[in-house]
Amino acid sequence: MTSRHLVALGLTAALGACASTPAPAPAAVSAVPPVSPTVVVSSAPAPATTPVPARLTPDAAYRQQAPGPGPEPTFHPPRWKRFKLKNGLDVFLVEFHDLPLVDFNLMIKSGGAANPPEKAGLADMTARMLDEGTKTHGALEIADQIASLGATLSTGGTWDSSNVSLSTLTRNLDPALAIFADVVQHPAFDDKEFTRVRDNTLTAITRRKDSPPTVATLALSHLLYGPKHPYGSPMTGTEASIKKLTPADLRAFYEANYRPNNAALIVAGDTTEAAIRGKLEAAFKGWRSKGIPSRRLPAPVGATGETKVFLIDKAGAPQSSIRIGLVGIERQSPDYFPVTVMNLILGGGFYRLDLNLREGKGWTYGARSSFDTRKTPGPFSAGGEFVAPHSADSVAEILKELNAMRDGDVTDAELARAKDQITKSFPARFATRSSTAAQLAELAVFNFPDSYLADYTKKIAAVGKDDVRRVARKYLSPAHLTIVVVGDRKSIEGPLGKLAPVEIRDLDGDPIVTGTADNAPANGQAPAK
Amino acid sequence: MHARAAAALAVLAGTAAPPSPTADLPQIAFEKYVLPNGLEVILHEDHRMPEVVVDVWYKVGSRDEAPGHTGFAHLFEHIMFQGTKHIPEDKYFEFLQKAGASNVNGSTAADRTNYFEVVPSNQLELALWLESDRMGFLLERPSFKETLDNQRDVVKNEKRQRYENRPAGLVLQVLAESLYPPDHPYHHQVIGSMEDLSAASVDDVKSFFRTNYAPNNASLVIAGDFDRAHTKALVDKYFGAIPTGAPVVRRPGGEVRLAVPQRIAMEAKIQQPQLYVDYPSPANFAPGDRELDVLANVLGNGKSSRLYKRLVYEMKIAQSVSASQQSQLLASTFEITASPMPGHTLDEILAVIDQEIAALKAKPIEEAELDRAKNQIESETVRSLEPLLARAERLQSYNYLLNDPGFLPEDLKRYRAVDAGALQHVAQEVLNKEGRVVVTVEPNPEAPIMGRVVKK
């Protein structure tokens, strides 16, 4: 089927779907084995590279400039219904009858942000244990049944929600929904299964440190938010936090947060309210509402005001992973719309960062920026992967672009391009049941009114140059920037030091206590801190 | 919802019960015709959303690269976005972004190169202008040398990002070089070598374009919300005048069989070892290919698979395991990968993999397990049909490999027809220790991130 080898190389890293839509690799034509692979006997020479005669396409007047668009197509987001089950569960239903599929996505409105600081990974582990056995069905039994039905069941989460997702053929809806409801309402958190999943997770966490880009992204958040803030640790936890978790912790998190009044169910696909409402009432009959604990997140530690480079050593790395960031904005912020436009002009594909560092300098495969917006302000990050000898140059150029965005104005052309890109591609967000469900999930998790989606493009269209200027000045403050570089310390520390003081950190972004093979100072002196 | 789409895609039968070989199967409605210059055109209408996909495949990939020119097909793909006689440098994306494109990219594989854009339906003509201009007017642009030098650097950074700065990123190259002899088109990776990328010249670009980027070596799929008669006129207007090229000569190559088993020891700057077990296998659509898809599902697809149950769930000696039949045009690879839990070795895992493969050869699998695998494959296929771009790509793929864009129901039928005896037979024929490549990667903090070969 799809495969790693078949995943073709794309033009750009972040713009396209090339990696997720390789050519389908369908099955064999012939109905009859046996297989008799032939031995290759390719002794013929490769095709000659002799000059090929030119073929000239006749030019035409209509080719001299881009053809104009046809009449603007009308588009309205698909209508959805919203109703509450008797136990308080909020249900969004959007109908798609083109394929015989129904998707269910249950969002529990408590995610990684609900992790106590010493229990990083708690929400994620709780979600991942849901389908590892219920009070009446074992982990493998659930997996086998779901596979036999041709369905998919997955559990996981974000910073703001814990999710259980089911996709089933319409004809198998009843048995698939029964498993889904069982997993949501009756997880066993069995000791033996927990130990297996915990040990497996610990091994996965150690592998995370092998990847320089992952190390850089996690270290930036760690430095911006600090150890006492949930965002300061990876959502999936750390070795220390996962080792301390117990099934009782998961059960307590589950009991406190997995409640119908703290959840929304998005149903997208080949069904109707008449067909599904009664089934949902029956399936979730025993699930009871309860008060949800309120929590306040601590303030992020933020930057100290002095610009510093936090350098994490990956000896011999041919590229440096650079992340320049600060604490950004929350998803509900009224500045969300101007910030979205500003960020696109700064760090969207083939906008400023890319045009400078990729198309101009040739130092990277892609330079981007993003505001990760959550219920409370998530990180802004600008950067990418840059060829090692130009690590310091790349940091300097990114800073230059951030400064230019803050101190200057965007052009009319940039503003129009960015706004058009967002507004005119907006209908594509509703092209599939899963992308539509994702839009409804945003409404549910952030408690947006139903009119939010209809107003989205109007709010983008209303963004002016002055709005972009205002949010650039407000958020891209140099005093708040934290710079993380993961790369070959020996060759890049010197040049980076000419930009700003360099502080060496370990693979978690923490100060180095005792040097390890990977982090021993290259010059043999004590670490900076 | 549009009636045509409903008729085209609606019906899928047989899942919880064993699939019936005669039940209705999903189809992707299409019309295919060929322009006088040889360009194949495939139209698929779907009016539910005001969007349209333009998807061009060129029947050229890294398999067409001669030794010394590795990575060229992909480097060339980058050049295709940099401008033409009528499209200024760095404006390709800008045109499409301003038009509201929701997805724009190109990709290069061993067997083909594709270029696509998903745009609002009122921007179809813009997409056709852009695609036809780079098919017809790529070479008549200024400052070729500067663009080539820049994109050469970009592609080298892509190689660093995807392979050299990725943990054990060298494995795929080692596997390709071990599975295929030096003169085989699959001996080298799509990304190519740094030396060959450095050596690529403007003359190479021009020659490659003239040889491969001709309408008779390409196919165009337009999918979505468009008027058919008007669209045909537009296709004619933009692509009709592009001259036919000479027939393309292919490098020879086919399925391979290894005379002796290979075991390659590698080490990398990683925390946990990795295991790769690769068997040369039949080409895409060749006899045995679909059985290997089913076998991969049975062995290593998710929590209901045999290897997951044994290695991860019961014995707890592997952190992860997966299996796949990686189908390609000339030859395929059946691959099993795994990584161990701390305190366990790759050889412990390999022994269990061998036991499970021996079990598949010794005894036909039970009907329930076979049906489970078939149901997963069939429902996954149905699920994959939802995005318009995925349907366009499927039409392209069937057209390229089988000259039949409408092969989908036949394809599904052939999965339904797989029986336990055929699976057993194919396992016996293909999954042999004597003809496989095993690559082990062990941690060594002194080794490069991408890894290095210790012993062949």
Image (cartoon, rainbow, N blue to C red):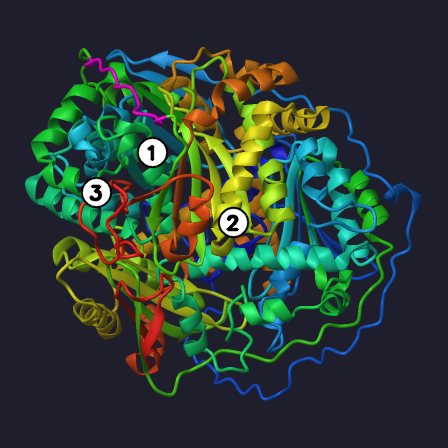
Rendered position, B165 above or below A138: below
Mark 1–mark 2 distance (CA, rounded to whole Å): 31 Å
Instruction: Tell me the amino acid under the disc marked 3.
Output: Ile
Per the image, the residue denoted by label 1 is A221
Instruction: Say yes or no: labels 3 and 2 on the same chain.
Output: yes
The disc, 3 or 1, on the residue closer to the chain's N-terminal end is 3
Q: Circle 3 is placed at which residue position?
A: A142
Residue A5's spot in the image, x, y percent? 45, 62
The CA distance from mark 3 to mark 2 is 29 Å
Residue bounds of the magenta highlight: A292-304
Q: Residues within 10 Å of mark 1 (few under 14, many from 20)?
A: many
Q: Is residue A248 magenta?
A: no
Q: Are marks 1 and 2 in contact (CB under 8 Å)?
A: no
Q: Position of residue B112 (x, y in %)?
A: 61, 62
> Where residue A475 sits: x, y (%)?
48, 21
Q: Is residue B46 above or below residue B162?
A: above
Which residue is drawn at the image coordinates 35% and 74% (left, top)?
A: B453
Judging by the rendered image, the residue that carries numbered circle 2 is A21
Specify the quadrant of the image occupied by residue B71.
Answer: bottom right
